[in-house]
Image (tube, grey):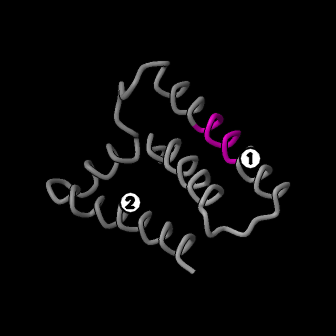
């Protein structure tokens, strides 16, 4: 699922970690990671807007619609755990050492 925050937050995080005063970095490697993150973010943003026919938040992701049909009135809490909590767990696994 492409949520718009996935196009912004990784770029903010990579700049935060690259410019942190306590960071010990290899300059070339840091620049490469920042550039690659920007390329990834621009690609993801482009795909989002292309899918939405160049309008901001025009329609709901089809997977949410499918969950609503499959689970009925309980879809909201199932989607919370299946999508949002799972993504947060994955983010924590990546960034927490």
Above or below 44: residue 84: below
Query: Can you name the residue that lies furthest to the right here?
Result: 28
**Label 2 CA crowd tier, 10 Å (few <14, some 14–19, many 20+):** few
Helix, strand or loop status at disc 2: helix
Image disc number at residue 83 = 2
Residue 52 appears left or right of 94: left
Per the picture, the main secondary structure of the magenta-coloured stretch is: helix
Q: Nearer the viewer, residue 31 or 65?
A: 31
Does dot 1 land on a helix, a strand or a loop? helix
The relative height of residue 17 versus residue 68 in the rendered view (above or below) is below
In the rendered structure, which disc, 2 or 1, sits on the residue that comes first in sequence?
1
Question: Quick check: 53 above or below 60?
Answer: above
Q: Count all numbered tags in the image, as a single digit.
A: 2
Q: Quadrant of the C terminus?
A: bottom right
Residue at screen point 38% across, 60% down: 83
The residue nearer to you, when weighing 35 against 61, is: 35
The residue nearer to you, when weighing 25 against 60, is 25
Magenta stretch in the rendered image: 37-44
Residue 34 at x, y percent in the picture: 70, 48
Where residue 36 is drawn, which disc sits there? 1
Residue 23: x %, y % from top left: 66, 67
Which residue appears at 81% of the width and 57% of the height?
Answer: 27
Distance of label 2 from label 1 (alpha carbons): 26 Å
Outermost residue toward the front in this view: 21
Taking the magenta stretch, the answer to whether it contains residue 60 is no
Q: Could you tell me residue 63's position as x and y percent?
A: 40, 47
Q: Residue at x 59, y 32 (%)?
A: 47
Q: Residue at coordinates 31% horizontally, 67% vertically from top-left? A: 81
- Residue 55 rendering spot, x and y as whole percentages: 42, 19
Whether tag 2 and tag 1 are in contact, CB under 8 A, the answer is: no
């Amino acid at each position: 699922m492409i949520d718009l925050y996935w196009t912004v937050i990784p770029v903010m995080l990579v700049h935060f970690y690259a410019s942190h005063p306590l960071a010990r970095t290899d300059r070339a490697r840091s620049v490469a990671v920042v550039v690659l993150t920007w390329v990834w973010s621009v690609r993801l943003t482009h795909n989002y807007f292309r899918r939405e026919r160049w309008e901001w938040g025009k329609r709901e992701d089809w997977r949410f619609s499918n969950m609503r049909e499959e689970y009925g009135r309980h879809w909201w809490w199932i989607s919370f755990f299946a999508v949002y909590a799972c993504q947060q767990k994955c983010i924590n696994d990546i960034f927490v050492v």
